[in-house]
Image (cartoon, helix red, strand yellow):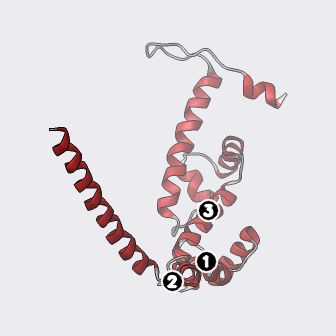
Amino acid sequence: MAVARELVVYLKRSGGQEQYSEPLQFQAESVSRFTELTTWIPTHLNEDLSVEVLAGRACLCPRHFSRRFKADLGTSPADFVERLRLDEARRRLSNEDNSIGNVGLSVGFKSADAFRRAFERRLGVSPSDYRRRFSSAAFRRAFERRLGVSPSDYRRRFSSAAKVLSVQQQRRESKKLSKAA
């Protein structure tokens, strides 16, 4: 029965005419309401994103908001926010300038311990292990171990080699043009 409800398509009147279909009006309202909210949340991760606050932004009571959010997006508001916070934390962990505790606090977790527990629960690895594996320093070490040269030296050598090839190719092209003329 749930699949049948999802597959029903209501007639939409063209030309800006009034829509008399309540389900169609509900669909339009719910999409725009949660679309705006889901684009707002990632830019406010370090703020209070409780169900009450999000429901207030969506102009719904918390209980109704939670039900509609889960029905429309397939996840609870808390899971959605936590997933976004952890995605941003993973990005920030690759930069070694911030401490792990500061990363957690900067994306909205109440404490470093709460951040660590959520990170381990969702990703199966601690934030410090994640940083060790995926930081830019770890990339540099693996790059140097594998190729015997730092990424910046490699880039410098490669770009100068590319310039030499480009000059050689330009000379060949100019010779071809002069022969053709």
The label nearer to you, 2 versus 1, is 2
| Residue density around tag 1, few if under 14, some if 14–19, many if 20 or more, within 10 Å | few
**Neighbourhood count class around disc 3 (C-alpha, 10 Å): few under 14, some 14–19, many 20 upward:** few
Q: Which residue is mark 1?
A: 110
Residue 57 in the image: state x and y as whole percent. 52, 51
> Which of disc 3 and disc 1 is earlier in sequence?
3
User: What's the amino acid at mark 3?
Assistant: Ser
The answer to the question of whether label 2 and label 1 lie on touching residues, with beta carbons closer than 8 A, is: no
Q: Secondary structure at mark 1?
A: loop
Q: Which residue is mark 2?
A: 96
Along the line of sight, the residue nearer the viewer: 45 or 123: 123
Which of the marked residues, 2 or 3, is nearer the chain's N terminus? 3
As measured in the structure, the alpha-carbon distance from the residue carrying label 2 to the one carrying label 1 is 21 Å
65 versus 138 height, above or below: above
| Residue under the point 51% across and 67% down | 47
| Residue contact at pointers 1 and 3, CB within 8 angstroms | no
- Residue closest to the eye, 117 or 34: 117
Q: Is residue 8 left or right of residue 29?
A: right
